[in-house]
Amino acid sequence: MPDPSAEVAREQASAMADTSAMADHLPEDPHLLPAPSEWFAPDSERHYLDRPRFCPMCAASIGDHGGITTEYWTADTRNFMTWCGGCGWFGEVVRFDRVTITEEDH
Amino acid sequence: MLTVEQNNELTQVGPGTPMGELLRRYWYPIAFEQDFDAVPARSVRLLSEDWTLYKTPSGKYGIIQERCAHRRASMTYGVVHKDGIRCGYHGWKYDFAGQCVEQPAEAENQNFKDRVTMKGGQAQTMGGMVWVYVGPDPAPELPRFDVFVKDGIRDVGFTTIPCSWLQIMENSVDPHHVEWLHGFYFNFVGETNGFEAPKAFQKKHIKTGFDEMEWGILKRRVLEGSTEEGDDWKIGHPLVFPFYMRVGGAYIDQMQIRVPIDDTHTWKLFYSTHNPGETLDVQDRPVVYEYLWKDEEGRFITDYIEGQDVMAWVSQGPITDRTQEHLGRSDAGVAMLRKMFKENMRKVAEGQDPLGTIREKHDIINLPCEKDKFGAERTFAAAWINGGSMRYSPIKQQLLELHQSYWAGIEAAEKAGAGA
């Protein structure tokens, strides 16, 4: 009898591999990105690869449901202002390298 | 930053595109009434399509696609009838809805004409301008925004700008540009050219806010020296979705209009109503004039407010490449506007009315707008008239005197009150 936990582990490993591939490789149609010779091409490439693809609230595809993500930067932090066309969720997904806490006045 | 597909979707206004379908749910001003004093028909371009706008002898306006369905000649050189327009080439006649009703060279006992319908729309006048609707039926009501229907001296500056209308709309939710482009940069231009730039635009932003509201996005700001009790925060002023911005102050009310001619051209109007007194003569038509934005050497004219804006919009490129932009926290309003466009494209795709559609009869739509702009109060009107596109108005001096007279009266009353 197959071990269910092993099956789940295999699926998770497969999913992680897919995610890893998604984050490291350009999409199949590179013409949608600026030419590599463009000065800001690396920023565009990271935006294309790193923007949220699914709604944090309902998990619908942002692209397939007519949503939009606009990226803006705050210091080292990358903010993705996101609207989900599936459930209407509107908020920010924030990507950062370091968690910084600013003390409130006290 | 956006992807290429997102940028394309937000900036393409032609038929069949998501943005084009959204924008076809609104009325647009596309000409002035006086444009038809000498000719009965004119060619106009709107939403990447060429149209013929015509006026019948009885004063009714119609709009129809420019190229005749028969052999593609221009309808602008056609014959205008009381119930439609006839192509000058072979006499095919179309009614206001675009239905072909006569084909003189064809046999009468056939239904050929019934099978030919040109794209048409609806047209009507308001505030001295001719407005058109070229979207699907039933057309919504023409929104009677306050600036177009309230009493006052009206003057309208216009020009055609070679860039996407969206660049101009994004400028309307970018409050910080005022402090820099119309403040710091204006001051630099003034120092370079030997004049004093208006101080009201140089104040530092302390806080900005954006609220979604029934007509678009209400923009608020607190400037250095002011508080949340000031008009700029307490009242604010709106971006009126999807192609206007309402501004004002010191008894000047203005609607800034950005008509999308096509993906890379915008008809940009500043429609102003001046009403600091109560006994103004009502004009039959507003004064209209073209404002300049390039000099004889082809350089942008940047010694006035709107000229500075045009420099920024046009220098971004015909359609700015948003895959190359780097937005910051102060651009949150821009991101919010893009979301609003996407949200309403979706509504249209689902068969719903988008934001700002009005289907009820109404007399006036009053929009929120600060009276004391930038805390400048009585100095604001003259600064705006002299430092903005109204400097090209043929009635500039009359407008300055109108406002100066009003504030002189206020000051005299204040002095009398202080001495009592």
Image (tube, rainbow, N blue to C red):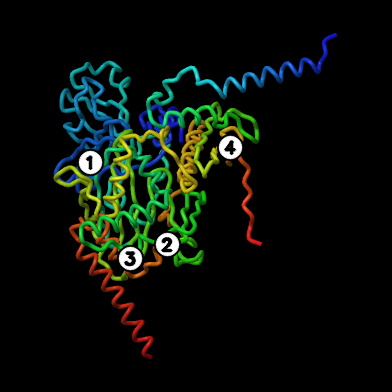
Q: Mark 4 — residue? A: A95
Q: Mark 3 — residue? A: B380
> Which marked residue is nearer to the observer: mark 4 or mark 3?
4
Q: Mark 2 — residue? A: B370
Dot 3 surroundings within 10 Å: few (below 14), some, or many (20 or more)?
Answer: many
- Tag 2 or tag 1, which sits nearer the N-term? 1
The answer to whether dots 4 and 2 both sit on one chain is no
> Which marked residue is nearer to the observer: mark 1 or mark 3?
3
| Nearer to me, B284 or B117 | B284
* Circle number at residue B23: none
| Nearer to me, B67 or B230 | B230
Q: Amino acid at mark 3?
A: Phe
Alpha carbon distance from label 3 to label 2:
12 Å
- Chain letter for the residue marked with disc 2 in the picture: B
Alpha carbon distance from label 4 to label 2:
38 Å
The answer to whether residue B359 is visible is no
The answer to whether dots 4 and 1 both sit on one chain is no
- Chain letter for the residue marked with disc 4 in the picture: A
Q: Position of residue A41 (x, y in %)?
A: 42, 28
Relative vertical location of residue B106 with respect to residue B118 in this rendering, above or below: above
Alpha carbon distance from label 1 to label 3:
40 Å
